[in-house]
Amino acid sequence: MANNNKAAMEEMHFFADVCKNFDHAAKFTQHDAGLLDQIRSCNSVFRFRFPIRRGNGFEVIDAWRIEHSHHQSPTKGGIRYSEMVNEDEVMALAALMTYKCAIVNVPFGGAKGGIKINPKEYTVQELENITRRYTVELTKKNFIGPSIDVPAPDYGSGEREMSWIADTYATMNPGQLDAMGVVTGKPIALHGIAGRREATGRGVAIAARECVSFAEDMEKLGLTAGLEGKKVIVQGLGNVGYYSAKYLAEFGATIVGICEFEGAIYNADGLDYDAVFQHRKATGSLLNFPGATSFENSGEGLEQPCDILVPAALENQITIDNIRRIKAKIIVEGANGPTTPEAEAIFYEEMGGFIVPDMYANAGGVTVSYFEWLKNLSHVAFGRMNRRFEENSNKNIVNMVESITGVNLSDSQRATIVKGASELELVNSGLEDTMIRSYHEIRETFVSTEGIDTLRTAAFVGAINKIAVSYQNLGIWP
Ligand code: GLU
């Protein structure tokens, strides 16, 4: 029993870790202790249980939805389907959503949901029953809605689950014009948006590219500027890890290692992330990928030589137990909470490392969720009104320049200049702009605040200041 308690206590530190980081950053702000307490606390915790029919009997499912902060409405955050889900984890993830949205100027409060199941052990029909019942429970309590709380995918859930949620909510709210804005990450054919699936990974890659673009910062780490030729290890080949690897490779980095729960592979000359993905799909495992060294202990994969490590799986992966064996100089956090505060302190102070924190690095997902929500509320796809108009204006300009100069463009040159922006291009442009601006903002706080220790602290300081202003604007605080 004592041991069980100890295990439970050890498990319950994720929210405390987030609060520890918050409290540390709060010292670099001037806010009233009460206001800081309001920002830090979880506002609403809804824990519920419901039965589903399974086999010849019933099973009771444990579930949560937690709204961390209402300084903006709606609240926003994914729903995790995992047998490891617990209240502490959902609270921590909800809090991270609040800070994440503030950092990238997405006007939402933070929330998160959890359903305690291993989705691999359930049939599609059972998963549908669970998801629809979860949505009904939230609807009954007014815990979901386009202007209340807007879920999205997270670990263990995806477009399919989001379409079940949208359909259930719409069914229970007949005639509600904005019903599709109740959830983001939907399939494109069901009111989703182009680019949402790739958004988190694309954002992670842009975050890494921005970080390494500052020559003076790289010099301190003993690295050169630019992604070209940088060796990267990615942990996780799910949605975030796969697209992080894809775009990092597209931006010029070399993916040298990939880790998953069954093990890890490494090849200093580079791995073709897509071939690895196909190999895993075909064999059920990363291991024995041709030309790569395989490690049955997945943790060993993180410790191989590289410049950048991208943990894109789950929280609590880089701890005091393994940090000193990490060879990377930069950690870009694709997952939420992969590095513990103790490990981060060692990485900066003893190992001269640098961490691009989760609440900024993986904010691409919620940024594009914001665009999807706007699309749902406006009932029109981005680019629909202006694409052809832009193309015609561009054609007129090109025709005029050609007639004045006598120079004729080739068909492909003409097509590149004339083309109006598609929804995907607009989404990607908004995402890139958001990621670049936010990095500059955080870095500016980092370099200009005396005594500040980490980029995470700088990100928290920015987030706390913005949330404080929202409370003041709401008139809740003087
Ligand atoms: N679950 C994702 C996250 O942790 C996405 C949240 C959203 O799009 O609302 O950021």
Image (cartoon, rainbow, N blue to C red):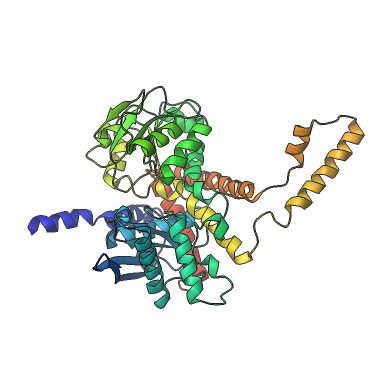
Q: Position of residue 158 (x, y in %)?
A: 43, 54
User: 202 above or below 175?
Assistant: above
Which image quadrant shows ligand 1? bottom left
Q: Position of residue 129 (x, y in %)?
A: 37, 66
Q: Position of residue 267 (x, y in %)?
A: 37, 25
Name the residue furthest left. 1
Name the residue furthest front. 56
Q: Is residue 64 visible?
A: yes
Q: Quadrant of residue 176?
A: bottom right
User: 469 above or below 286?
Assistant: below
Q: Is residue 113 visible?
A: no
Q: How many marks?
A: 0
Q: Position of residue 76 (x, y in %)?
A: 45, 62
User: 230 above or below 121?
Assistant: above
Give left or right: position of 175 versus 292.
right
Give left or right: position of 446 versus 127.
right
Q: Quadrant of the N terminus?
A: bottom left
Residue at image coords 58%, 51%:
194
Residue at image coords 57%, 70%:
178
Residue at image coords 40%, 73%:
136
Give left or right: position of 265 versus 322.
right
Q: Quadrant of residue 256?
A: top left
Closer to the camera in the image, 413 or 281: 281
